[in-house]
Image: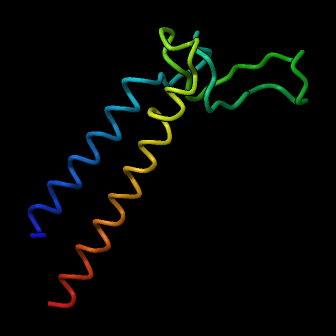
Amino acid sequence: MTKSAKILCLLILLGVAAGSNLLLTEWGADRQGVPILTAQLGSTSPSNSVQGHGFGLYSRVSLNETPWIPMTFGLLLPLVCVGGMAYFLVRLDSESIGS
């Protein structure tokens, strides 16, 4: 695989990671979607009766009935793509050092 092909693979993986995350999830505070990966601010106890301001990653409102789709393809797929990017970066450096 040539250096330009590896760079193209990096850009494709970056596009897939960012695109799937932005298409299937919403980032922000107190959104209407199902919380996927959120944190609460202002609560001092872990009980559900204390409602603080939450921020983080929520599913799209249209996908509220199937939260596994944004979890899988909006959070886990981008993590796999970032791992693939790290692999290509390491392989790109190792071949340039060995030449």
* Apparent side of residue 79 relative to residue 95 in the rendered image (left or right): right
Q: Quadrant of the N terminus?
A: bottom left
Residue 18, x across and y down, in percent: 34, 37
Q: Is residue 13 above or below residue 95?
A: above
Count the numbered circles shown.
0
Residue 6 position (above or below residue 47): below
Q: In this view, does 92 lie above or below 50?
A: below
Residue positioned 77% across, 19% down in the render: 52
- The single residue placed furthest to the bottom in the displayed view is 98
Q: In this view, does 70 lie to the left or right of 46?
A: left
Q: Quadrant of the C terminus?
A: bottom left
Measured from the top left, where is residue 72 in percent x and y?
Answer: 51, 35
Quadrant of residue 44 in the image? top right
Answer left or right for 6 relative to 56.
left
Q: Quadrant of residue 22?
A: top left
Q: From the top left corner, tell me how far across and down residue 61 is, in percent.
A: 51, 10
What's the residue at 43%, 50% (across, down)?
80
Colour scheme shown = rainbow
45 or 95, which lies in front? Answer: 95
**In the visual, does 25 lie left or right of 98?**
right
Please tell me in which quadrant of the rendered image residue 51 appears.
Answer: top right
| Residue sitting at x 35%, y 58% | 84
| Residue 90: % across, % down | 32, 73
Query: Residue placed at 69% from the left, 32% from the top?
Result: 39
